[in-house]
Amino acid sequence: MDIRMPGMNGIDATRHILRKLPATKVIILTTFDTDENVFDALRAGASGFLTKEVDLAELRRAVEVVAAGEALLSPSVTRRVVERFAHRPGLPRRCTR
């Protein structure tokens, strides 16, 4: 799924598809990897978020990973998500078990 498409953007399309077919797995594949797009796509239910710079082997692997029920983000996106999560106020500094 791309972010920018004619008629309906990919985030709204993802939300719509998953509302109708909740077992569907969606991978966003886009050049528009802003934080806003990443988090909106994840909130909409996307299972993956990749930039179009991904090579064919990585894309194939992403499809396999997501089809198996896991989630996958491009490494640059993962880094930003972790950084944003780690710097949120009020989060515990360490895990307790």
Image (tube, rainbow, N blue to C red):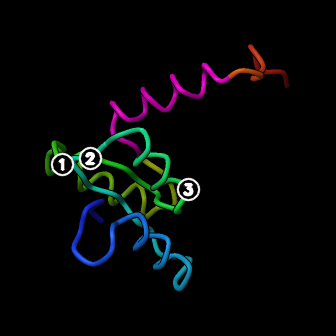
Asked whether 74 falls inside the magenta stretch, the response is: yes
Q: How packed is label 2: few (under 14 Cα within 10 Å), some, or many (20 or more)?
A: some
Do the residues bearing badges 3 and 2 touch, measured as CB atoms within 8 Å? no
Looking at the image, is mark 3 or mark 2 earlier in the sequence?
2
Q: Nearer the viewer, mark 2 or mark 1?
A: 2
**Percent position (x, y) of residue 59?**
23, 53
**Percent position (x, y) of residue 67?**
42, 65
For the C terminus, the image quarter is: top right
Type of amino acid at the residue the image marks with label 1: Lys
Q: Which residue is mark 2?
A: 32
Q: Which residue is mark 3?
A: 43
Type of amino acid at the residue the image marks with label 2: Phe
Q: How packed is label 3: few (under 14 Cα within 10 Å), some, or many (20 or more)?
A: few
Residue drawn at x 33%, y 39% is 74
Looking at the image, is mark 2 or mark 1 earlier in the sequence?
2
- Is residue 86 or residue 61 the one in the foreground? 86
